[in-house]
Image: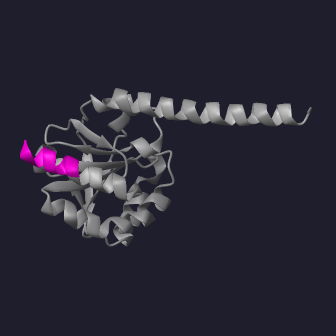
Amino acid sequence: MRRILPIVILCFLAVASTGCKKAQLRRQLKELMGSTIVLPEKISCVYNGEVYPMPDYLREKAMLIMYIDSTECTGCRLSKLVEYHSFAEKLREWNTEFFVLLTPKRNEQEYVTDLILSYVYPFAVFMDDEGAFFLRNPQFTGKPSNLHTMLVDQEKRLALLGDPLGSDAMLELFFKRIQTINKQ
């Protein structure tokens, strides 16, 4: 009997904490869904062996923003971007940009640029040179990195949060939202 009570209490705590995490995530999503994303002014574009300022016309396009901040393992995340090759091409068919935006650590900008150039991506990778993304979008500060992938419309209003390649259901929802954005 003495052994059963601690087991029951542990089971109860496990169920309660899982429910709390889901409720917290639901609350965070609700807070973020009404927001508008502001892109930093100074963004460098790294593509096809060159580094240049981000073209202004991109600011007017719908996009899937995948933000990689300086606290994440940049090399790890960059190596996984090759998985998005065909997905990025499909996005272009839907008139939507695949917009990888990263903020390197202050002393690693040159290293990260060289690392990006060493990969052959079919899309550009953008660098937030001054680390201004969180300053311009404080609603994302402190949020988990799985909420740093976001679909935005042409006015940069948030349409969907999460990695579309995370699951088949997410991918399907993602393409439904893109269709809605394109009809506007």
| Quarter of the figure with residue 21 | top right
- Expressed as whole percent of the image width and height from the top left, the position of residue 132 reads 34, 36
Q: Quadrant of residue 93?
A: bottom left
Residue lying at 24% horizontally and 40% vertically, measured from the top left:
159
How many marks can you see? 0
Q: Report the span colored magenta.
A: 176-184
Q: Is residue 178 visible?
A: yes
Which quadrant, please, contains the N terminus? Answer: top right
Q: Is residue 110 left or right of residue 64?
A: right
Q: Residue furthest right?
A: 2
> Which image quarter holds the C terminus?
top left
Identity of the residue drawn at 27% across and 64% down = 87
Question: Horizontal placement of 10 versus 141: left or right?
Answer: right
Would you say 14 lies left or right of 117 here? right
Q: Give above or below for 12 relative to 163.
A: above
Q: Is residue 158 magenta?
A: no
Within the magenta stretch, is there residue 183?
yes
Which is more toward the observer, 155 or 22? 22
Our reading of the magenta stretch's main secondary structure is helix
Q: Residue 97: percent from the left, percent from the top?
A: 20, 55
* Colour scheme in use: one colour
Above or below — where is 92 with respect to 42? below
Residue at the (36%, 26%) spot, across then down: 31
Residue at the (21%, 67%) spot, across then down: 89
Q: Position of residue 104 (x, y in %)?
A: 42, 49
Furthest residue toward front = 1
